[in-house]
Amino acid sequence: MSVETYSSAKQKIEKEILRLQKQMKSLRVKQRRPVIASIVKSMQDNEITIEEVAEALEQSARRGAGASSNGPKTSLPPKYRHPGTQDTWTGRGRPPRWIIDAEANGRSREEFLIK
């Protein structure tokens, strides 16, 4: 393929990409119109102000930022205690071996509840 043929093909493809991007933007606008109209109607029906929505968005953003998986995890208080070893378990996640063994031997998990 010659340089001129390549350049010509490249220009045609770039024009087609731009046309498709404009078409996609137009479709996105058309898709969003009824959603926005529904939101506006709900706001009017419930007498919700723009300021209330802005405040709710800010609160949502703060909660979202605080819910990072990199943040510190809060520990739960133990719910179960082994009477002999004093080992504890929160009741979440995979049960410890001592609970599994006790249940296999016919004991109830409730026997180990911390009161």
Image (spheres, helix red, strand yellow):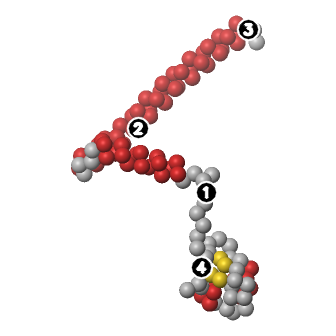
Figure quadrant of residue 98: bottom right
Q: Which mark is residue 31?
A: 2
User: Dot 3, crowdedness within 10 Å: few (<14), some or many (≥20)?
Assistant: few
Q: Mark 2 belongs to which amino acid? A: Gln
Residue 93 x/y as whole percent: 65, 71
Residue position for label 3: 3
- Check the image and report above or below for 12 versus 96: above
Q: Are marks 2 and 3 in contact (CB under 8 Å)?
A: no
Tell me the CA gap for discs 2 and 1.
Answer: 40 Å
Residue 64 x/y as whole percent: 50, 50
Judging from the image, what secondary structure is the residue with disc 3 in? helix
- Camera-nearest residue between 23 and 54: 54
- Camera-nearest residue between 48 and 17: 48
Q: Mark 1 belongs to which amino acid? A: Pro
- Camera-nearest residue between 110 and 83: 83
- Image quadrant containing the C terminus: bottom right
User: Dot 4, crowdedness within 10 Å: few (<14), some or many (≥20)?
Assistant: some
Between disc 2 and disc 1, the foreground one is 1
Side of 84 relative to 14 (left or right):
right
Q: Which mark is residue 72?
A: 1
Q: Mark 3 belongs to which amino acid? A: Val
Residue 26 x/y as whole percent: 43, 29
